[in-house]
Amino acid sequence: MRLLHIYSCRGMGLKTIDKMFAHDPTFKEVYNMSKNDLKFYYQMNEKQADVFHQDLNKSIDELFRTEHGSFQFITRLDKEYPHQLRHIFDPPWILFYKGDLSLLHKEKSLAVVGTRYPTKQALPIMKQILYPLIRNDWCIVSGLAYGIDALSHQLALNENGSTIAVLGSGLQSIYPKEHKKLAETIANNGLLLSEFLPLQPPAKWQFPLRNRIISGLTRGTLVVEAKEKSGSLITADQALEQGREVFAIPGSVLNPNSKGTNNLIQQGAKMVLCSQDIENELFIEKN
């Protein structure tokens, strides 16, 4: 609970928590520190030290529960924390969730990402590739965004399969708002996940952080359709940095939504023509 308390304070960032943990894994000493101590040990500036010190002297109920309501969470210190995610470069300290936490430990999982504006060919292609995986107990991980993300979640739900939606906002600040019903369905039949405080609104800088979790939870990331500078390519890059496999579906050179995926294949991503291409690479050959 100390970690949640500290995490909820203003002026706190992931790197600062890393420094605190390295200095004191119990997170006890910080409660006895002055503002000058905070600046010295954790390189906080005057404003950060001031607001952090103010919040640290509030109770967890006053600081967190009153504002954010009911919630469930796990931390990096808990045994329930997902093994795959623990081994990325900068794993989140806290994960807030709604739904079935056991999905974090499914051996067969695949991140699926792509453009927010897919072509009409995307859905039948996704059905052909993802349905066999879903029926074979693969968990589909994506980001609840428009387009490929939402289609991925919906295909899993259609087949009574498992899916995880990782948010770039808090669990009580669903983005996009049009996907609130989809988020509720996922919470009841799968898992909603976020490293952000429950009422945290979406912000542009938060989505690359979310993407590292999407790729970090799985052995591989499939890019379905992506333009040359699509944001989904950030997730593919992060998957590579994490030592995970990257898959891409090829497409016509005349289709702008295939330029990103075709480029990935040229750069060494695994070309996917059927579900077996993914299963062979991620599961059969790894076991």
Image (tube, rainbow, N blue to C red):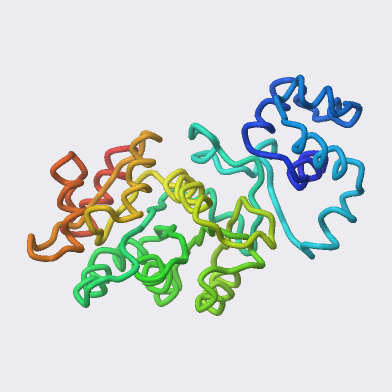
Q: Residue at x 36, y 61 (%)?
A: 136
Point out the image quarter for the C terminus.
top left
- Give the image location of residue 97, x and y in percent: 64, 58
Name the foreground residue: 34 vs 63. Answer: 34
Does residue 8 appear to the left or right of 91 in the view shown?
right
Residue 259 sits in quarter: bottom left
Name the foreground residue: 173 vs 131. Answer: 173
- Give the image location of residue 245, x and y in percent: 31, 41
- Give the image location of residue 57, x and y in percent: 92, 42
Residue closest to the far left: 253
Q: Residue at x 33, y 46 (%)?
A: 236
Does residue 278 appear to the left or right of 206 in the view shown?
left
Q: Residue at x 74, y 20 (%)?
A: 23
Q: Residue at x 38, y 44 (%)?
A: 219
Name the foreground residue: 238 vs 1. Answer: 238
Residue 252 sits in quarter: bottom left
- Give the image location of residue 175, x and y in percent: 54, 68
In this view, 42 is above or below 228: above
